[in-house]
Image (spheres, rainbow, N blue to C red):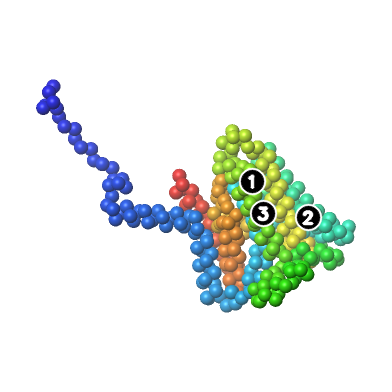
Amino acid sequence: MSDSTTKTRPQMPQPDGPRNKPLSARAGMSRLSAWRTIWERSGMLLVFVALVVVCSIWVPKFPSLRNMDALFLAIATIGIIACTMLFCLASGDFDLSVGSVVALSGVVAALVTNFTGSVVLGILSGMLAGALVGLANGFVIAFLGINALITTLATMQIARGLGLLAGGGGPVGVGNAGFYVLGTSSLHDIPWLRWLGDTGNVGAWLLGLSSPIWIVLVCFIIFGLLLKKTIFGRNTLAIGGNKEAAMLAGIPVRLTKIVIFSLQGMVAGFAGVVQASQMNMGDPDVSKGLELQVISACVLGGVSLTGGVGTMTGVVMGVLIMGIVENAMTLLNMPTFWQYVTSGSILLAAVLFDRLKQRRAV
């Protein structure tokens, strides 16, 4: 057949892709994508700033230095435990036993301090009690294959029961005055730092901040560096991202999980000792529901419930946002049950936001 008789091919309709859209539509999509990226990267920071501005304007006494001290002190326990809950969540698991571990460790520390007269032994024993619970969690999850929900739900009950048994069903007071130093001291007790009090109101405020505030700040720094700058931190994120791929890459998945949960238990135990020092006693009934507050703060800060994603900066934002909301409600004299409703709503919103980000990433 000659070229003159060759039939021309029909033109196929072009797909309605981005290149075929008008320039205005493409520009609009580009702006939307840019705003979406900004929100996903810095959304919680924007929420935090907006929350501070709104509360400073509308909530009486919120911006005062005295209230800031109370706010930071209130989030200290949550902040300390959130540092290691970040590792649990980033590895694809979570720990529901931390609230009970806080209570158990406080009681153990009080009993050992009373029995031996040594504050150091009391502190170490409380941390050891928490580490043992965490070690049990890690072993059952990593080697026996029981999921974290069932395992830590069980150890939550066990640890709470052991705390009640050890304390005889009630709080255990401590007669050693040195036990209170960990939770109630400040920089003012360090002679060579007292010059800060002469630098003005802010310097005097920093000098008067209680030790738990400085402890949580140190924890944020240490565990932030551990996650970002060490092989252990990279392994944690790799396990949460794809456990099978991590195993093929030679990462010791089981051992890493055991270390993560042991570390979580030890840090929760230390938080329990600090709290007992603040209260001047070990109380087996404290910190009920603390685990949900910690997980809420982490998820609110962008830590994925499915693992593989999480930053310490995000966790700090999440902890501060939770603390500011509760502090504002307290200053506004809102009933306690509204605080429960708000905390649950924040957790639900954080989970929905996490799910939305996962769907966009697919």
Give the quarter of the figure containing the N terminus: top left
Q: Which residue is mark 1?
A: 230
**Which type of secondary structure does the marked residue at label 1 adopt?**
loop
- The three-letter code of the residue at mark 1 reads Thr
Quick one: label 1 or label 3, which is nearer the N terminus?
Answer: 3
User: Is the residue under label 1 in contact with that under label 2 (CB below 8 Å)?
Assistant: no
Q: Which residue is mark 2?
A: 126
Characterize the local packing of mark 2: few (<14), some (14-19) or many (20 or more) Cα atoms within 10 angstroms: many
Quick one: label 2 or label 3, which is nearer the N terminus?
Answer: 2
Characterize the local packing of mark 3: few (<14), some (14-19) or many (20 or more) Cα atoms within 10 angstroms: few
**Which type of secondary structure does the marked residue at label 3 adopt?**
helix
- Residue 120 image position (x, y, % from top left): 83, 57
User: Is the residue under label 3 in contact with that under label 1 (CB below 8 Å)?
Assistant: no
Characterize the local packing of mark 1: few (<14), some (14-19) or many (20 or more) Cα atoms within 10 angstroms: few
- Residue 272 image position (x, y, % from top left): 74, 58
- Residue 352 image position (x, y, % from top left): 50, 54
> Spatial distance from mark 2 to mark 3, Cα to Cα?
21 Å
Q: Is residue 12 above or below residue 224?
A: above
Can residue 201 be seen here? The reply is yes
Q: Which residue is mark 3?
A: 222
- Residue 328 image position (x, y, % from top left): 58, 71
- The three-letter code of the residue at mark 2 reads Gly
Q: In front: 4, or 340?
A: 4
> Spatial distance from mark 1 to mark 3, Cα to Cα?
11 Å
Label tally? 3
